[in-house]
Amino acid sequence: MKEYEHDSKLTAIYRDWFASEISDEEIAREKRAFIAAHFSEAPVAVLQPVMMVPAMCLFAFFAWFGLQFMRLPEAPHAAKALTQDRKWQEPAEVRRLTSEVGPTLVYQKSYQEKPITIIWVFQTIP
Amino acid sequence: MRKLYITILASWLLGVAVGTGSAQAAERAQPLIVTIITASDQGEDFDLDNDGYRDQLIELFKFTSYKQVDQQRVYLARSERSKMELPDGYELVLTFQGEDSGRLMLQAVIRKGRAQYMDTVIMLPKPGVTFLGGPRVGEKTLIIVLEMSF
């Protein structure tokens, strides 16, 4: 029983001592000064997901925003449907055709099983 | 826990941004290859970037000489006009009007000054090739090849 009381008193003493130290402004100031003098601040964790994901999000947004106004470059040697092996079955369908300079004609020819539509105007007015 | 919420939110925003961009790009971009050729019966020259055109042109038309003036890959946005300068003051105006059953509805206008040399609305298959032609460029004849990409 005496031993228990002794431990309780010791605990109370330690608690009071810690409390007084923590609340002591002078000690706290010295601790801050010591830390500032001997330890640099922790670097910003830029590679963590919490930083990287918003950054990627912003990047993706600006990239998309830029694409809205960017004209895709011209292909100097574009794929040419006429000269490729792939075939197609359906010709183009002409819904309307007018001209102010002469009569018009639509005809279709097949070249290597590729139906090709030709829309022609016979220019009679210079 | 707070970091987890921020990560989820940021991922969602990223997905929305990328998804919206892709969808709009797909809606917007209708690639079309436009080749401008002048043809005549003077000489027998074939001045074309792609020799593969030679046989087709010989079979389709009766001219003896062909010269490629220009070739561009244009990306047509719905209801937006795409203009191309042609030889001798001509102008080609292409307007993507919509898509139906995999076909592109395209208005093509060839004009010079106030005169409309050709005004047509075509349903182009994918892939597919259509020739427009007839307007005179001096002693030559203008031919325009429209190719829907694959």
Image (cartoon, coloured by chain):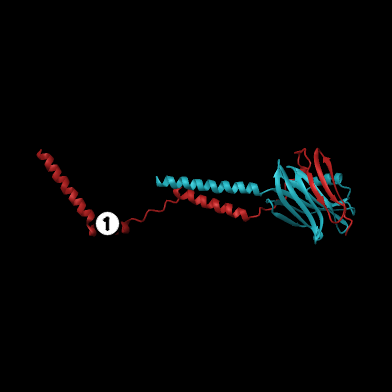
Where is residue A77? Give x, y as percent. 73, 49
Crowd class of label 1 (few under 14; some 14 to 19; many from 20; radius 10 Å): few
Quadrant in which the N terminus of chain B appears: top left
- Left or right placement of residue A35 versus residue B26 in this view: left
The residue closer to the viewer here, B95 or A1, is: B95
> Which chain comes out red in the rendered image?
A
Where is residue A31? Give x, y as percent. 27, 56
Quadrant in which the C terminus of chain B appears: top right
Q: Quadrant of residue A71?
A: bottom right
Q: Quadrant of residue A82?
A: top right
Residue at 21% x, 52% y: name it. Answer: A19
Q: Is residue B47 visible?
A: no
Residue at 74% x, 53% y: name it. Answer: B94
Residue at 20% x, 54% y: name it. Answer: A20
- Left or right placement of residue B63 versus residue A1 in this view: right
Where is residue B27? Give x, y as percent. 64, 47
Q: Is residue A44 visible?
A: yes
Disc 1 target residue: A31
The residue closer to the viewer here, A63 or B91, is: B91
**Identity, as a three-letter code, of the amino acid under mark 1:** Lys
- Left or right placement of residue A81 versus residue B62 in this view: left
The residue closer to the viewer here, A117 or A42, is: A117
Q: Colour of chain B?
A: cyan
Q: In the rendered picture of this protein, how many numbered marks are placed on residues? A: 1
Q: Secondary structure at mark 1?
A: helix
Q: Chain for mark 1?
A: A
Where is residue B99? Give x, y as percent. 70, 45
